[in-house]
Amino acid sequence: MAEKESNLDCTGLSRNVWLVKVPKYLSETWGKADDSGIVGSLKISKTPTTQVKFELSEHLSKAGSIGGVALPREHKLLMSDVSQSLAVFSETSTDPSDQHISQGESQFAFEGKVAKRADCRPVENPSYMLLKKLAIKRAAEPARKIQQITKLRHETNFKPIGDHRENVEREKRRKEDKKRIRAEKEEVMEKLFSAFEKHQYYTLKDLVHITQQPVIYLKSILKDVCIYNKKNPHKNTYELKPEYRHYKTEAEEG
């Protein structure tokens, strides 16, 4: 597959640029700049050591205010040398009216070689410390808050309840099991055989009501004398094992 050729503008080949790391609030504020594109001023003083300062424009300082506190305007740039080769490239959309370049292609340009690194930091004055305190306070606030509902909201059909119905029924069954006192196994089996004389199939709920025994205890007895049907037409029901049946099956009656 043939690679697509693109033109590279190398007019900035001899230009040196700085790679500057700025605080997040500063980069977000620069995005609010007006059409003039002026975000501040850079001051370089020649002393025994070169000092570089950046001053944010006043209107952007107020536009990016947090909680009524304006952003710090004074910043200092901590300069350092670059130990590796770095360069800056740009990509711009082409003008559809340009006949020399196909429509939809992008123009690439070499903007310059990185000569210095810089770390932009705000000057620690009372205004900045107040802004920092406000930012820490906001970060500590929980994302979700508990809100008390004082009146019924009819528009959403929402009504606070003490507990869900499933939990109430589960708790009710648990209390009923505690109230039931375990009887002797022989006594429970007599009640079961007496019930199966009337009907051949019973659900677990019906047998619990008949015997008045805890569910777990009753299941252990049913395991010995009954068969649990897992298929239709009598799915999820119990019937006596063949050796305990005294009634005739449908085949014998036929």
Image (cartoon, helix red, strand yellow):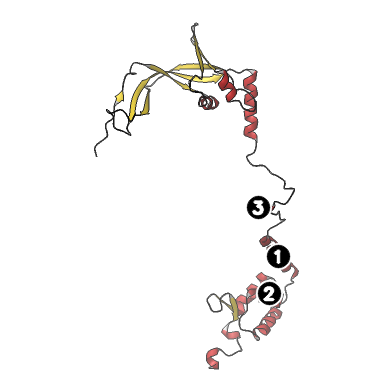
Q: Nearer the viewer, residue 207 or 117?
A: 117
- Callout 3 touching callout 1 (CB < 8 Å): no
Left or right of residue 1, residue 162 in this image: right
Q: Amino acid at mark 1?
A: Arg
- Callout 1 touching callout 2 (CB < 8 Å): no
Residue density around tag 2, few if under 14, some if 14–19, many if 20 or more, within 10 Å:
some
- Measure the alpha-carbon separation of dots 3 and 2: 41 Å
Residue 139 drawn at (x, y percent)? 62, 33
Q: Amino acid at mark 2?
A: Val
Residue at 64 percent of width and 22 percent of height: 129
For marks 3 and 1 on the same chain, the one whose residue lies earlier in the sequence: 3
Q: Which residue is mark 1?
A: 174
Q: Amino acid at mark 3?
A: Thr
Left or right of residue 110, residue 64 in this image: right
Residue density around tag 3, few if under 14, some if 14–19, many if 20 or more, within 10 Å:
few
Left or right of residue 49, residue 182 in this image: right
| Snapshot quadrant of residue 236 | bottom right
Residue 138 drawn at (x, y percent)? 64, 32
Q: Which residue is mark 2?
A: 208
Residue 4 drawn at (x, y percent)? 27, 34
For marks 1 and 2 on the same chain, the one whose residue lies earlier in the sequence: 1
For marks 3 and 2 on the same chain, the one whose residue lies earlier in the sequence: 3
| Quarter of the picture holding the N terminus | top left
Residue at 52 percent of width and 90 percent of height: 251
Quick one: SS at disc 2? Answer: helix
Instruction: Name the residue at the left extreme.
Output: 2
- Measure the alpha-carbon separation of dots 3 and 1: 34 Å
| Snapshot quadrant of residue 172 | bottom right
Q: Which residue is mark 3?
A: 156
- Callout 3 touching callout 2 (CB < 8 Å): no
- Measure the alpha-carbon separation of dots 1 and 2: 13 Å
Quick one: SS at disc 3? Answer: helix
